[in-house]
Amino acid sequence: MDIKRIVMAGGVLATAGAIGFVMQNGESAKARYAQASVPDISGTAAEPMEVTGIALTSSVIGAKANVAEPRTEMQAQQDAAVAGSMDAPAKEAPVVEVKTAALDEDVAPETDALAPPASLCDIEMTATPVAAAMVDIAIAANCYPNERVTLHHSGMMFTEETDKDGNLSVSIPAMSESAVFIAAFANGEGALADAKVPSLEFYDRMVVQSKASSELHINAFEFGADFRDEGHVSLKSDRSMADAAKGKGGFITSLGDASQAEALVAEVYTFPTSTVKQQGEVHVSVDAEVTSANCGLRVEAQTLEVSGAGALKVQDLTLPIPSCEAVGDFLVLQNLLQDLKVARN
């Protein structure tokens, strides 16, 4: 088969600047945070289009950053997720009024009405920083064997599954120095853990996330490398966090269990900008493979970027996939992720 690689400059239809647990609003946020009966945000039917006829436009969407206690925020997101479907108009989250009382004032007990339901079991979750600004997450939930769980961290969201004993271990690239991780089960039960990751300042990170069926993948070309050269870093490359920790080059982490129904997945490129031994430019692109599962659809995704533990940059992406006649071809999205320029002092 003659595989085509169609290069597209840009490719961003919407951009949002939310930092923290909430990285987007509206129906896309509802779909991503939903724990059960997730609507299919990986694609809605689009008119068939030829490979050569793809054109993208640009617009900007604003999103407010929310500051709240992690557990309260998670509950708010889950409430928003089930509030409507993709076909319903977006609704603003209800405003919760908080009343305070003077120190000497009697307050009527209302804790029974406000308290969350008792946990079905004890869920233990730990976060341990390791090399290359990664964090090892361990979850022990003995009453949730082989259970679907969604992990959240600084806007990243991906689907995993516990083992037969209710345990799960996953290594997650930190996106903030004060990193908070949330695990949410389908019934609303969950846990959170936090870790300090000061080594993040030495790295640049880029994330693309969507439904597994979207088939979006990061490709990095370090210091002038061409396709399939040694410096071409992809999920298939023989690179690890040890290479980044030693300043040899970047690596890619795959997050999420694609075998789960409507699975959310993420791919993360980590580059040791402050410690790499070479200098020059690192070009980063996102490829979208045209498959029988996504052809003719419009897929939704997000990219997240953080440099030197700075502010998190978030972009929303809507991408029309060519018709099914193009199955096996690839769309190459240029300028979607920021290229890196490395200079040694």
Image (tube, grey):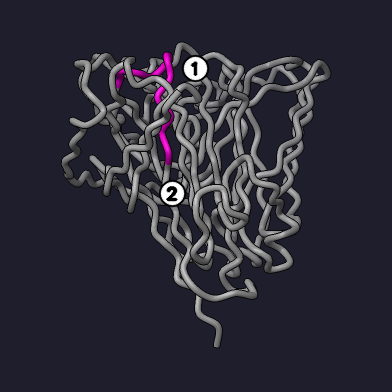
Tell me if mark 1 has few (under 14), some (14-19) or many (20+) residues whose alpha carbon lies within 10 angstroms of its own.
some
> Does 272 appear above or below 266?
below
- Locate residue 77: give its quadrant: top left
C-alpha span from label 1 to label 2: 21 Å
Q: Which residue is mark 2?
A: 304
Residue at coordinates 21% horizontally, 33% vertically from top-left? 54
Q: Residues within 10 Å of mark 2 (few under 14, many from 20)?
A: many
Q: Earlier in the sequence, mark 1 or mark 2?
A: 1
Residue 78 appears anywhere in the view: no
Q: Which residue is mark 1?
A: 262
Left or right relative to 292: residue 164: right
Which contiguous range is marked in magenta? 287-297
Say what secondary structure mark 1 lies in.
Answer: loop
Can residue 30 be seen?
A: yes
Residue at the top extreme, as displayed: 37
**Which of the labelled discs sits on residue 89, or is there none?**
none
Q: Position of residue 152 (x, y in %)?
A: 55, 37
Q: Is residue 35 left or right of residue 27?
A: right
Q: Report the front residue among 2 and 222.
A: 2
| Amino acid marked by disc 1 | Glu
Q: Nearer the viewer, residue 344 or 132?
A: 344
